């Protein structure tokens, strides 16, 4: 059996220590480009995000990849660079990111491919990108690997268009507020934690963790003062319509359309999902009053949420437009951490094995059988000494007075609050799902159990979550030595 304490100490080591030099001074020229491309398939696909297979029955709102290219220059010398591409997808598989970076080497030789960041909005109505989890018809449906290749090429197209279109620009940052997400984990008198657990029961005791309603917003203006791009950091996954069987960008589509209606059809809206592993847009209480008001305002639920985000964006823009910065320094650090894996107990492995036996009997439950089998396999590796630290790539950027930091997880909100509270930056943008995903729960969540906090839902537990948080804060604060 793995010694969890010893594993934590060993795995807190860093794989690629970043050079924490002082950041570039204000005065360098900042060049920014932005672009948007479609990533909607041209035929039916399996949709990711649920335990059962769904085949798309049309397109309600197209899915897109939206890119922001940043470069800091001193005359002819490039000081640092970053290309951030946000995609209307459930997650970003490692193989797709690797494929996109490999293609970038020939498409944009002067760009360091490791400075490409790709994140997902976590919509549950976008294509499946990996084989093995769902049973997918072979006829009349685009297969996951075919879509994955198409996606990698489209990511490169967005990145290249943004990079090639970069020009001297001004940037600004602002803070708004939007009540979109609610903590979705209910706790009960016996200590249980249940995702989307009913809140009208006698033993209901409240929500398990905090909520974050802040809206961090980045703005980019061209040399004439025209707004050409904005990045919106919303701590909420895009999954209001998650159970439907159509392709849909979810709440981000009406948000983009509303902002383009105000600032021009060529405005690029980049969607950054903040740390929100235990948050979602689904109502947990006060449902009747919320639905009554929405009905009186004659809005769908998606329209209601989008209106709140746009109002928060306006709040941020009102301040930010008064302070447009042309010489904001850019520093971009990339690091791979080795996080301690979550230890699987014998009881958890036995329960998972029983579920494998149960679900294996029904082909329609293939995904659930695979999900539980992974826990059994991890326990065996653990018992036989084959368990390995969990490698994860993080990016930390300084852009003027703000920090931008990424992680690959559905990271519980408490970790994000820690990062923001401990950061020296004026504002801290946190982008989750810059990778494949899996939940990363807090210690109270693990004690409560339930989906999102059990071993099936995560490969890294609270110990690794704290290592990730501490190292992210350390990297951010090193960029503010003053």
Image (cartoon, rainbow, N blue to C red):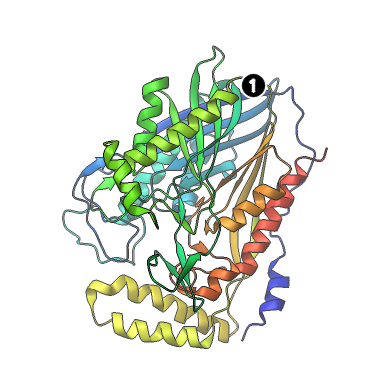
Q: Is residue 422 visible?
A: yes
In the image, residue 431 lies at what x, y percent? Answer: 54, 47
Q: In which quarter of the image is the N terminus?
A: bottom right
Q: Residue extending furthest left?
A: 139
Q: Residue at x 68, y 25 (%)?
A: 73
Q: Which residue is drawn at 36% across and 74% down?
A: 370
Q: Which residue is drawn at 29% across and 73% down?
A: 366
Q: Name the residue under label 1.
A: 323
Q: In this view, does 303 lie to the left or right of 218?
A: left
In the image, residue 20 lies at what x, y percent? Answer: 77, 45
- Front-most of 144 and 328? 328
Q: Can residue 64 be seen in this view?
A: no
Q: Is 232 located above or below residue 189 in the figure?
A: above
Quarter holding residue 167: top right
In the image, residue 237 lies at what x, y percent? Answer: 43, 50
Q: Which residue is drawn at 55% across and 30% down?
A: 316
In the image, residue 310 lies at what x, y percent? Answer: 43, 32
Q: Is residue 183 left or right of residue 113?
A: left
Q: Is 72 located above or below residue 275 in the figure?
A: above
Q: Residues within 10 Å of mark 1 (few under 14, many from 20)?
A: few
Q: Is 387 located above or below residue 66 in the figure?
A: below
Q: Is residue 299 left or right of residue 314?
A: left
Q: Residue extending furthest top?
A: 224
- Front-most of 44 and 427? 427
Q: In which quarter of the image is the C terminus?
A: top right
């Amino acid at each position: 059996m793995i010694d969890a304490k010893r594993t934590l100490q060993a795995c807190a080591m860093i794989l690629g220590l970043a050079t924490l030099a002082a950041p570039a001074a204000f005065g360098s020229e900042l060049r920014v480009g932005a672009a948007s491309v479609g990533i909607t398939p041209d035929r039916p696909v399996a949709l990711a995000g649920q335990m059962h297979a769904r085949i798309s029955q049309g397109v309600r709102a197209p899915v897109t990849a939206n890119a922001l290219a940043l470069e800091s220059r001193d005359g002819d010398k490039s000081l640092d660079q970053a290309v951030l591409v946000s995609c209307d997808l459930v997650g970003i598989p490692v193989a797709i990111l690797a494929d996109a970076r490999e293609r970038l080497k020939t498409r944009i030789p002067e760009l360091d491919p490791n400075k490409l960041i790709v994140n997902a909005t976590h919509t549950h109505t976008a294509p499946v990108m990996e084989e093995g989890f769902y049973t997918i018809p072979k006829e009349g449906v685009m297969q996951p690997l075919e879509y994955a290749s198409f996606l990698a090429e489209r990511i490169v197209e967005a990145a290249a268009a943004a990079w090639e279109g970069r020009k001297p620009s001004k940037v600004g940052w602002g803070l708004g507020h939007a009540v979109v997400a609610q903590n979705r984990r209910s706790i009960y008198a016996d200590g249980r934690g249940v995702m989307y657990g009913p809140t009208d029961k006698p033993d209901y005791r409240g929500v398990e963790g905090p909520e974050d309603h802040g809206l961090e917003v980045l703005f980019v203006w061209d040399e004439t003062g025209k707004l050409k791009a904005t990045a919106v950091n919303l701590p909420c996954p895009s999954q209001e319509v998650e159970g439907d069987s159509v392709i849909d960008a979810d709440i981000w589509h009406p948000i983009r359309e509303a902002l383009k209606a105000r600032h021009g059809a060529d405005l690029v809206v980049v969607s950054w999902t903040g740390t929100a592993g235990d948050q979602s847009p689904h109502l947990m209480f006060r449902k009747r009053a919320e639905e009554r008001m929405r009905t009186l305002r004659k809005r769908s639920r998606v329209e209601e949420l989008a209106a709140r985000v746009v109002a928060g964006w306006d709040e941020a823009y009102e301040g930010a437009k008064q302070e447009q910065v042309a010489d904001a320094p850019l520093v971009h650090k990339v690091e791979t951490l080795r996080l301690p894996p979550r230890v699987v107990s014998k009881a958890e492995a036995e329960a998972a094995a029983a579920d494998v036996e149960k679900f294996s009997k029904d082909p329609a439950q293939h995904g659930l059988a695979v999900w539980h089998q992974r826990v059994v396999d991890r326990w065996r590796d653990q018992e036989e000494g084959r368990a390995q630290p969990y490698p994860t790539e993080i990016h930390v950027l300084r852009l003027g007075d703000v920090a931008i930091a990424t992680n690959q997880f559905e990271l519980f909100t408490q970790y994000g609050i820690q990062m923001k509270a401990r950061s020296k930056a004026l504002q801290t943008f946190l982008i989750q799902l810059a990778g494949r995903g899996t939940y990363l729960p807090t210690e109270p969540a693990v004690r409560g159990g339930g989906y999102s906090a059990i071993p099936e839902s995560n490969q890294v537990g609270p110990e690794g979550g704290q290592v990730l948080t501490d190292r992210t804060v350390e990297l951010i604060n090193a960029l503010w030595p003053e």
